[in-house]
Image: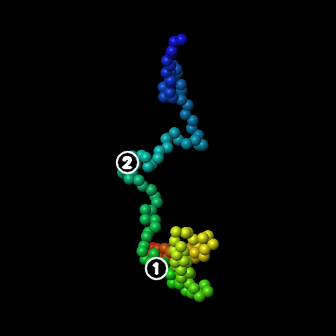
């Protein structure tokens, strides 16, 4: 038995004789144009070699005034002794000390620490969010329009 070698023909080449085929171009309102889709981030020197987008780089517009006044604005009302003669801040910080007393063991799911943690931080984040809206809205004359 004689061993024969055969070549594997890929998609780019063909061993079949070339036939002059007429390419048909379809034009329709439903079909897109024949341009190839390009990723704008991969096109070299598309925008001077830098990546651009329409998203504002300084979207947070961080201002330490908002953080400071927001924290003070939350600490003041959360320190009012309104829960059985205790404040929310006092209960939260007190529960931290209680849970740190048995440090390697995490707090139990039934511990009041979780309630005070979620309530205190939820109030803080709401206060910071409204502070950011109010402070930036005022500095950018949003409320004057």
Residue 115 in the image: above or below residue 13? below
Which residue is label 2 attached to?
45
- Say whether disc 2 or disc 1 marks the residue closer to the N-terminus: 2
Check residue 122 in the rendering and tell me which mark sits there, or answer none.
none
| Disc 2 + disc 1, Cβ < 8 Å | no
Q: Check disc 1: other Cα within 10 Å, few if <14, some if 14-19, many if 20+.
A: some
Q: For the residue labelled by badge 2, is the local secondary structure a helix, a strand or a loop?
A: loop
Q: How many marks?
A: 2
Q: Check disc 2: other Cα within 10 Å, few if <14, some if 14-19, many if 20+.
A: few
The structure residue drawn at horizontal position 51% and vertical position 39%, both measured from the top left corner, is 34
Q: CA distance from mark 2 to mark 1?
A: 45 Å
What is the x, y in percent for residue 86?
A: 57, 85
Which residue is label 1 attached to?
69
Residue 81 in the image: above or below residue 117? below
What is the x, y in percent for residue 58?
A: 43, 65
Of circles 2 and 1, the one toward us is 1
User: Which one is nearer the viewer's eye here, 59 or 118?
Assistant: 118
User: Which one is nearer the viewer's eye here, 129 or 138?
Assistant: 129
The structure residue drawn at horizontal position 40% and vertical position 48%, both measured from the top left corner, is 46
Q: For the residue labelled by badge 1, is the local secondary structure a helix, a strand or a loop?
A: helix
What is the x, y in percent for residue 105?
A: 55, 69
Residue 41 in the image: above or below residue 57? above
Does residue 94 appear to the left or right of 48 in the view shown?
right
User: Which one is nearer the viewer's eye here, 101 or 31?
Assistant: 101
What is the x, y in percent for residue 4?
A: 50, 15
> What colour-coding does the image apply?
rainbow
Q: Is residue 138 visible?
A: no
Q: Residue furthest top?
A: 1
User: Which one is nearer the viewer's eye here, 23 or 134?
Assistant: 134
The structure residue drawn at horizontal position 56% and vertical position 81%, both measured from the top left corner, is 91
């Amino acid at each position: 038995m004689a061993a024969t070698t055969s070549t594997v023909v890929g998609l780019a080449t063909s061993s079949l004789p070339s036939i002059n085929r007429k390419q048909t171009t379809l034009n329709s309102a439903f079909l897109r144009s024949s341009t190839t889709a390009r990723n704008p981030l991969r096109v070299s020197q598309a925008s001077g070699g830098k990546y651009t987008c329409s998203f504002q780089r300084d979207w947070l517009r961080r201002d330490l005034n908002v953080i400071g006044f927001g924290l003070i604005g939350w600490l003041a009302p959360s320190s009012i002794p309104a829960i059985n003669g205790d404040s929310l801040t006092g209960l939260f910080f007190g529960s931290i000390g209680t849970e740190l007393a048995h440090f390697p063991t995490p707090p139990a799911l039934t511990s009041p620490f979780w309630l005070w943690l979620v309530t205190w931080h939820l109030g803080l984040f709401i206060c910071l969010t409204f502070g950011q809206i109010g402070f930036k809205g005022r500095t950018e004359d949003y409320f004057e329009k």
